[in-house]
Image (tube, rainbow, N blue to C red):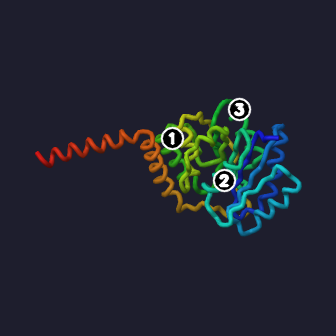
Amino acid sequence: MTPTISVLIPAYNEVDTVEELVARTVRAFEALGVEGELIFVDDGSEDGTGERVESLQRTYPWLRLIRHRRNRGLTVALQHGFQAAQGAFIIFLPADLESHPDEDIPKLYHKLLEGYDVVSGWRQGRADGKVFASTIYNAVSRWLFDVGVHDANWIKGFRREVIEDLPPLRSDWHRFLLHIAADQGWRVGEVPTTWYPRRAGRSHYGFARIPISFLDVLVIRFLLTFSQAPMRFFGGLGLASLLISGVIFT
């Protein structure tokens, strides 16, 4: 039977959270009364993450595993998960249990059923030291993309058509899935979710990445604008060149 919901969890050295993630996802599917699948993308883990998932597949036939021989990054992990997903709705969650699947899968799913094409979670009670930078980043994102969400880089739910309409993703473009979807005209919504501190392992996103994220969001705004109106860009550039030439040669 084709699942209604596909849940994607990219994981890199997250062996300690696998069993709880599966158990909480089971509760979410049961509470919603839907068929679902959970896809772990083991992104080159060295701590037995993939083996732990495999050990649970005998109990949960809807539990799937994609394995990378080396760490390839979150964008590639998500792309491979998207390609494998069979559900009409696709939900992306982290592996560190900062999001609880039994709470957040129903929230995202119900919001999608209201008619939204993409739904982003909005972390409540966040206390990881990056709140200020995240607030500024999201304010810039709202201004550049006219997207009315407060937490663009958190958990997300998509209708399948949105995923199928995405362009090929460049390195680290996982952070801009919502921006790209909004730019393509899909209806974007938001739902508050509870943030939980990481209990095991360590974060794979450091403070050094924050300045680069600000630059990246400017770059993708330019690229999306350019892809939609290249002649406007080159026309403006040509006009500027003509005016400069006129000044030089008169």
- Image quarter of the N terminus: top right
Q: Nearer the viewer, residue 35 or 211?
A: 35
Which residue lies at the image location 65% right of the left edge and 66% below the top edge? 70
Task: Tell me, for residue 113, which label it has, or none.
Answer: 3
Task: Tell me, for residue 80, which label it has, or none.
Answer: 2
* Contact check, label 1 and label 2, Cβ < 8 Å: no
Foreground mark, 2 or 3, reads: 2
Q: Amino acid at mark 2?
A: His
Foreground mark, 3 or 1, reads: 3
Q: Nearer the viewer, residue 108 or 236?
A: 236
Which residue lies at the image location 81% right of the left edge and 49% below the top edge? 24
Q: Which residue is mark 1?
A: 142
Q: Quadrant of residue 129?
A: bottom right
Left or right position of 118 against 87: left
Q: Quadrant of residue 102?
A: top right
Q: Secondary structure at mark 3?
A: helix
